[in-house]
Amino acid sequence: MHDAAPAVDIPRLTRHTAGRVLAAVLVCGAAVLLFAVHVRPLGYLPLVLGVALGLVVDKRLGKDLALIALGQVIISTISLKADLSNVGMLKFTVALGLAVVVPTLISSRVFHDDKIHFPVRTGRRWDRWQALYLVAVAIAAYLILPAYFLGSGVWRNWPDLDGAGDIARLFVGVNAVGIWDELFFICVVLALLRPHFPFWLANLLQATVFVSFLWELGYREWGPLLTIPFALIQGWIFRRTASLSYVVAVHLLFDLIVFLVLVHAHDPSLFDIFLTGGS
């Protein structure tokens, strides 16, 4: 006679749990309205409702959602359309910088939490799989990104390049935003969500904000087919490595190809090194 199989404890979706999830979905889903659909001020409504609901069902969750909402509000004060002018780059620097600094300071100095941190020096060497993954990213980016940017025409979402000065500005801008992406979406948004939800759900929520931001930035057409898995994988890699320097390295390697493709798209005589692409 066989023993009965042990009972599996499957947590029920209680009102409390449903309220917590709904609050986070409202706050992170607001990014779709604020950045992808660009419906303002309507997009601020789910931010307010999500934070309020979060405070009702779980005060600590509500505080963390408020920080995520605050970051989104700060970002929304500027247009995310690529702008290589002095004023445009200054606006990006101030707004995106504050979106990271303000929630971080409030979390540590006001709420006395240590959820947000930026682990650059982990004291561990990169494993072989990490090195191989960087190679894989470079190959995938080299093959896929020209087909995406040139084939879909989304390269036109970036401004014209007038000489070496604009090319240098584009290089700085692409890489600076790439670094910021990991600081905000991984080290702030994901970090604030992880203590409250299973990792898979927290990662999906941060990816929603991440991809919405990238859509307004210019990654449109079939761009989400690239940006959604990229955002999810970056979150997973950070969980596995706990290394900001590694996820930034991955992102900057990807963005190097983005930069080369954008320059080539604006001036086909430059960086004519790609095998894939469209007319």
Image: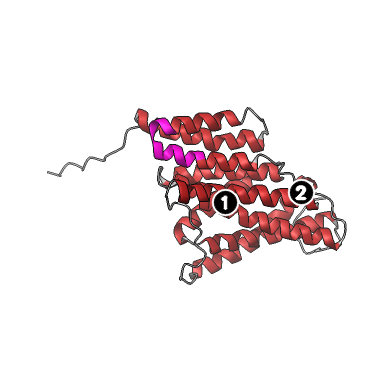
| Residue found 65% across the figure and 29% down from its top | 41
Quadrant including the N terminus? top left
| Residue found 22% across the figure and 40% down from its top | 7
User: What is the count of numbered marks?
Assistant: 2
Magenta stretch containing residue 21, yes or no?
Answer: no
Which residue is most to the front? 110
Q: Is residue 177 above or below residue 71?
A: below
Which residue is at the front of the view, 228 or 171?
Answer: 171
Local SS, label 1 = helix
Q: Residue 51: x and y, percent?
A: 49, 33
Q: Quadrant of residue 197?
A: top left
Magenta stretch containing residue 59, yes or no?
Answer: yes
Range of magenta residues: 55-66
Q: Quadrant of residue 257?
A: bottom right
Q: Residue 178: x and y, percent?
A: 64, 55
Q: Amino acid at mark 2?
A: Gly
Q: Amino acid at mark 1?
A: Val
| Residue found 58% across the figure and 60% down from its top | 248
Q: Residue 157: x and y, percent?
A: 77, 45
Local SS, label 2 = helix
Name the residue carrying label 1. Answer: 101
Name the residue carrying label 2. Answer: 88
Which residue is most to the left? 1
Q: Is residue 229 above or below residue 18?
A: below
Residues packed near mark 2 inside 10 Å, few (<14), some (14 to 19) or many (20 plus): some
Q: Nearer the viewer, mark 2 or mark 1?
A: 1
Model colouring: secondary structure
Which residue is at the front of the view, 32 or 155?
Answer: 32
